[in-house]
Amino acid sequence: MALVALHSASTALNALSTSLDVTANNLANVETTGFKASRTNFQDLMYLEKKQPGVENNNGDQRPIGLYVGLGTRVSGTQLDFTQGPIEITDRQLDLTIAGRGLFQVEVGDEVGEGFAYTRAGNFTRNRDGEMVLATDEGRRLEPPIVIPPEAVGVTVTEDGTVSVSYQDQVDSEIVGNIETAIFVNPAGLRQIGENLFVPSAASGEAQLGEPLQGARGGILQGALEGSNVDPVTELVQLIKTQRAFEINSQSIQAADEVLQTVGRLRSF
C-alpha cells in the first residue's frame, strides 16, 4: 500500500535531516583546533514478511526467495573519526600537538566525567597562578597540574612530555613537570560534551594514562597545533548527496500521495 511508502519516505527524511545536521557541524568546525569529524551511520528498519523463503510452494518445491517490504531507515549513530589532523606550526611555546593516539587530560566539574575530560586541542596558556590551562573561555586546567614560575623566560616541552623552564640569569633549565596523555580502547565511543572535550563512557573504556612515546600514545611536538581533520571537499560532496537523497524521498512521498488520491477517487458502479 501507498501508506507504507509514505512511512518509509518520511523515516528517510528524518534520518537525512539528522545527517545534514552532522555534516553542517563538521563544516562549522573546519577551523576548530583538534576537532574530530563525525560520520552518520544508517540502518534499515523492520520488514513486513509477506512470504518466507524456503517454504513449500504450490508445486511442492521450496521457495528460493521471500517477499519482504521494508519500513524505512533511521540513524543508528554518529561515529567519530580520530585520524590525525594536519599539523600547523605556530612557534608558540605553549602550543602542543600529539603525533599519535594520545589525548591531553584536563580538569572539569565533578558532575561530568568524574572530574576529568580529554582533548586533542593543545592550545595552552597560563592562568594567573601560572598553571597550564587551555586557551578557551573556561580555561580547563591540564592534569596533572604544571605550574610555570612567573620568572621563567622560556618553556621547553620534549617529546616525552617533560616540561622545563629557563631563567634570565641561569644557564641550566629547571624541570617543572611531566605531561601525561591518555589512550582509549575505543575512542569512537567517547562522549562529546563540547569545548573540544571528550569524557569516557562504557563503550570507550577507561582512560589509560601514561607518558608520551609509550605504546601508541605518540610524542608531543612543541610550537605546533593539530588542525581539524574535517575534509571540506568530502563534507561538501556529502552535503550534495544528502540534498539529492532528500529530494528523491520527497518525490516518493509525492508519488504515494498521488496513488492515494487515485484510490480515493475510485467509485463503485
Image: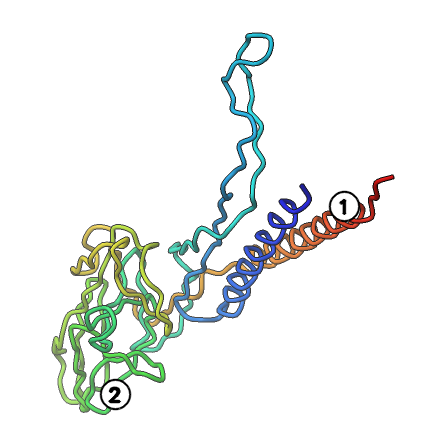
Count of all numbered marks drawn on residues in the image:
2
Tell me if 226 is positioned left or right of 113 in this view: right
Tell me if 17 is positioned left or right of 78 in this view: right
What amino acid does circle 2 point to? Answer: Asn
What secondary structure is found at the residue carrying circle 1? helix
How far is disc 1 from disc 2 in space, using C-alphas? 67 Å
Q: Nearer the viewer, residue 76 or 119?
A: 76
Q: Nearer the viewer, mark 1 or mark 2?
A: 1
Per the image, the residue denoted by label 1 is: 259
Q: Is residue 223 above or below residue 152?
A: above
The crowding category of the residue bearing disc 2, from other C-alpha atoms within 10 Å (few below 14, some 14 to 19, many at least 20), is some
Per the image, the residue denoted by label 2 is: 127
Tell me if 25 is positioned left or right of 107 in this view: right
Q: Residue at x 35, y 54 (%)?
A: 188
Q: Which residue lies furthest to the front in this view?
A: 269
What amino acid does circle 1 point to? Answer: Val
Q: Which residue is drawn at 24% across and 73% down?
A: 106
Whichever of callouts 1 and 2 sits on the residue coming sooner in the sequence is 2
Locate residue 193, reporting x and y percent.
Answer: 35, 70
Q: Residue furthest top?
A: 60
The quadrant of the picture occupied by the C terminus is top right
Q: In this view, does 211 lie above or below 57?
A: below
Locate residue 145, reporting x and y percent.
Answer: 16, 77
Locate residue 160, reporting x and y percent.
Answer: 19, 62
Locate residue 2, reporting x and y percent.
Answer: 69, 44
Q: Image quadrant of residue 108?
A: bottom left
Q: Residue 5 carries which label?
A: none
What secondary structure is found at the residue carrying circle 2? loop
Q: Residue at x 20, y 57 (%)?
A: 206
Q: Which of 50 and 109 is in front in this view?
A: 50
The quadrant of the picture occupied by the N terminus is top right
